């Protein structure tokens, strides 16, 4: 298989947390080649509702040994650790790799605006609003992308699928992040 059919992608997800908790939230990155070969796992922490999420991820990923072979980044949303907003355009541009956001629900119907306003973080909405609009890539899977054309983003997504509707690097990162907090993973995977 070609490198494009077996992309080297890092999936990034945060662990579960309580609103207003003082301890930072675990952030897990899982680098995979294609949908079935885990190449590396990295763990860091980020404050609940923290500022500077994009810069934080850029610095973290640049410092990882997996960075030179990275061909893409996949996130499960445009926020980490609550309301830490990730600017996927800036993330992609800074790391010079495509950035994908893959979700099971249409983010256009999400109540993010209300959450930001309730938390007094309405200024962060500008980043969310300039994020590329997600489209339904397949039934029950929504995709937003930066640093890559739509057809190439779909090919990259297909190159990461195996067990579930979600890309394997993201699914595995979710499992590990949940286990770090609660001792084991659970829920839809």
Image: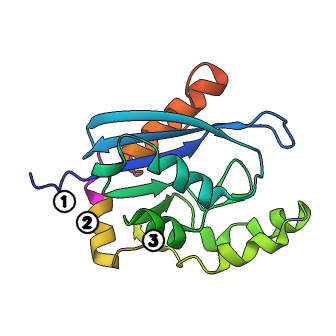
- Residue 186 image-quadrant placement: top right
**Which residue in the protein does label 3 denote?**
93
Alpha carbon separation for disc pair 1 and 3: 20 Å
Alpha carbon separation for disc pair 2 and 1: 8 Å
- Residue 83 image-quadrant placement: bottom right
Residue 32 image position (x, y, % from top left): 31, 42
- In the depicted view, which residue is nearer to us: 92 or 9? 92
Number of disc labels = 3
Residue 163 image position (x, y, % from top left): 33, 41
**Which residue in the protein does label 1 denote?**
4
Alpha carbon separation for disc pair 3 and 2: 20 Å
Task: Tell me which segment is drawn in magenta.
Answer: 158-165
Instruction: Please name which of the two marks, 2 or 1, marks the residue nearer to the observer.
Output: 1
- In the depicted view, which residue is nearer to us: 167 or 7? 7
Q: Is residue 127 above or below residue 97?
A: below
Instruction: Please name which of the two marks, 1 or 3, marks the residue nearer to the observer.
Output: 3
Which element type, helix, strand or loop, lies under badge 3?
A: helix
Q: How crowded is mark 2: few (under 14 residues within 10 Å), some or many (20 or more)?
A: few
Which residue appears at 61% of the width and 53% of the height? 56
What numbered label is drawn on residue 155? 2
Q: How crowded is mark 1: few (under 14 residues within 10 Å), some or many (20 or more)?
A: some
Which element type, helix, strand or loop, lies under badge 2?
A: helix
Which residue appears at 76% of the width and 52% of the height? 50
Q: Is residue 30 left or right of residue 2?
A: right
- In the depicted view, which residue is nearer to us: 35 or 4? 4
Compare marks 3 and 2 and give the one earlier in the sequence: 3
């Amino acid at each position: 298989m070609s490198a494009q059919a077996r992309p080297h992608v890092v999936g990034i997800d945060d662990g579960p947390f309580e609103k207003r908790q003082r301890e930072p939230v675990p952030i897990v990155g899982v680098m995979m080649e294609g949908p079935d070969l885990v190449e590396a796992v990295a763990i860091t922490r980020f404050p609940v509702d923290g500022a500077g999420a994009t810069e934080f991820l850029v610095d973290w990923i640049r410092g990882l040994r997996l960075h030179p072979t990275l061909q893409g980044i996949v996130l499960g949303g445009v926020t980490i650790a609550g309301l830490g907003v990730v600017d996927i355009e800036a993330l992609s541009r800074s790391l010079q790799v495509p950035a994908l956001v893959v979700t099971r629900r249409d983010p256009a119907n999400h109540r993010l605006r209300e959450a930001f306003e309730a938390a007094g973080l309405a200024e962060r909405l500008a980043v969310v609003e300039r994020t590329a609009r997600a489209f339904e890539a397949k039934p029950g899977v929504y995709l937003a992308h930066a640093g890559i054309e739509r057809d190439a983003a779909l090919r990259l997504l297909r190159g990461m699928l195996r067990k579930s509707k979600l890309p394997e690097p993201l699914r595995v990162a979710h499992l590990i992040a949940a286990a770090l907090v609660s001792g084991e993973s659970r829920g839809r995977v």
